[in-house]
Image (cartoon, rainbow, N blue to C red):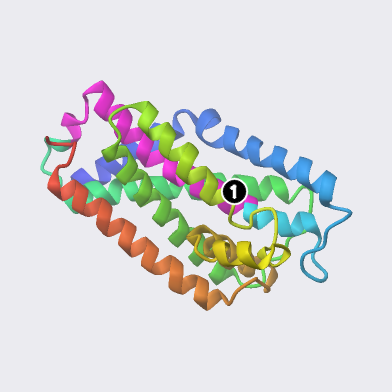
């Protein structure tokens, strides 16, 4: 396990050394969303009875930050290693495929959770936020970040250049996260768009995570868990299979 621990340490250190860029910048971005939407809609919108719009918005912003940064960590690390040609120094040591995958996955999850915690702590300066079900909150945070961490590994392996990775982020990751109920309840949408939203797995991640804070949600949290858990297993399996095949890593 020495190789696994070393690779995990290297991947955590990689984003920790540039903390201002990898953690502080996403926290600032989320804070801007909070200030703008809370000021514009805070006095006019109440999604759940007894829950202010700012309190409703906070879990969505936290989860959005977790997902985007979990994806960015593994994908950016792999594409940089491939573009710079130093991926060979990771592949040559006697590290198993699972250790390779687990190190990148865990480091990405750690970054996502650190950014999410930063957003949450800053948000507490602007609103009171209780946690009705801490176990649900933690479960959805870990599982959802694992989904996007595995997707980031897949994207980092597949991409041949930074433009490819930017395309995945702009045309896949961003729409999934922004059209998932971060800023609104799907019950405020027309029937057609409510149905469309239920095909977006990120909606279930955010809705289940929000349930952990407020104890209310748009769908049953067990249904959300039934969507997110298989998504984590499937995305992890795909990433692990790509690593085992050596696709665009060893060939």
Residue furthest to the top: 84
Res. 194 visible in picture: yes
Q: Considering the numbered disc 1 on the image, is that residue within a helix, a strand or a loop? A: helix
**Which residue extends farthest right?**
43
> Which quadrant would residue 79 be assigned to in this image?
top left
**Figure check: 202 above or below 34:** below
Magenta segment main secondary structure: helix
Q: Which residues are magenta?
A: 61-90
Q: What residue appears at the point 44 percent right and 66 percent down from the top-left corner?
A: 228
Q: Nearer the viewer, residue 197 or 88?
A: 197
Residue 85 percent across, percent down from the top left: 21, 23
Q: Nearer the viewer, residue 235 or 65?
A: 235
* Quarter of the view holding residue 218: bottom right
Residue at 68% across / 73% down in the picture? 216
Q: Does residue 144 sit above or below 163 in this rendering?
A: below
Q: Is residue 98 magenta?
A: no
Q: How many marks?
A: 1
Residue 111 visible? The answer is no
204 relative to 149 in the view: left or right = right
Q: Position of residue 181 (x, y in %)?
A: 63, 58
Report whether 235 appears left or right of 181.
Answer: left
Give residue 172's position: percent from left, percent from top: 46, 45
Image point 11% across, 35% down: which residue? 251
Above/below status of 105 relative to 190? above
Residue topped by disc 1: 178
Whether residue 73 appears in magenta in the rendering, the answer is yes
Q: Is 245 above or below relative to 27?
A: below
Q: Horizontally, is 213 left or right of 250 in the view? A: right
Question: Residue lying farthest front?
Answer: 192
- In percent of width and height, residue 78 lies at 30, 35
């Amino acid at each position: 396990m020495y190789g696994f621990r070393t690779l995990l340490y290297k991947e955590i250190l990689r984003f920790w050394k540039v903390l201002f860029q990898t953690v502080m910048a996403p926290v600032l971005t989320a804070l801007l969303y909070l200030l703008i939407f809370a000021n514009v809609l805070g006095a006019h919108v109440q999604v759940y009875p007894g829950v202010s719009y700012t309190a409703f918005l906070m879990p969505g912003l936290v989860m959005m930050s977790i997902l985007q940064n979990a994806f960015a960590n593994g994908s950016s690390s792999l594409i940089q290693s491939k573009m710079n040609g130093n991926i060979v120094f990771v592949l040559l040591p006697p590290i198993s495929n699972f250790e390779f995958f687990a190190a990148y996955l865990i480091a990405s999850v750690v970054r996502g959770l650190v950014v999410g915690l930063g957003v949450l702590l800053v948000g507490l300066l602007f609103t009171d936020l209780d946690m009705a079900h801490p176990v649900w909150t933690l479960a959805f945070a870990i599982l959802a970040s694992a989904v996007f961490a595995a997707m980031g590994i897949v994207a980092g392996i597949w991409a041949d250049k930074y433009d490819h990775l930017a395309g995945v982020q702009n045309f896949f990751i961003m729409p999934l996260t922004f059209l998932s109920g971060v800023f609104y309840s799907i019950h405020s949408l027309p029937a057609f768009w409510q149905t469309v939203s239920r095909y977006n797995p990120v909606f279930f991640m955010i809705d289940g995570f929000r349930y952990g804070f407020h104890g209310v949600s748009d769908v049953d949290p067990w249904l959300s868990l039934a969507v997110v858990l298989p998504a984590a297993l499937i995305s992890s399996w795909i990433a692990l299979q790509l690593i085992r095949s050596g696709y665009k890593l060893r060939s």
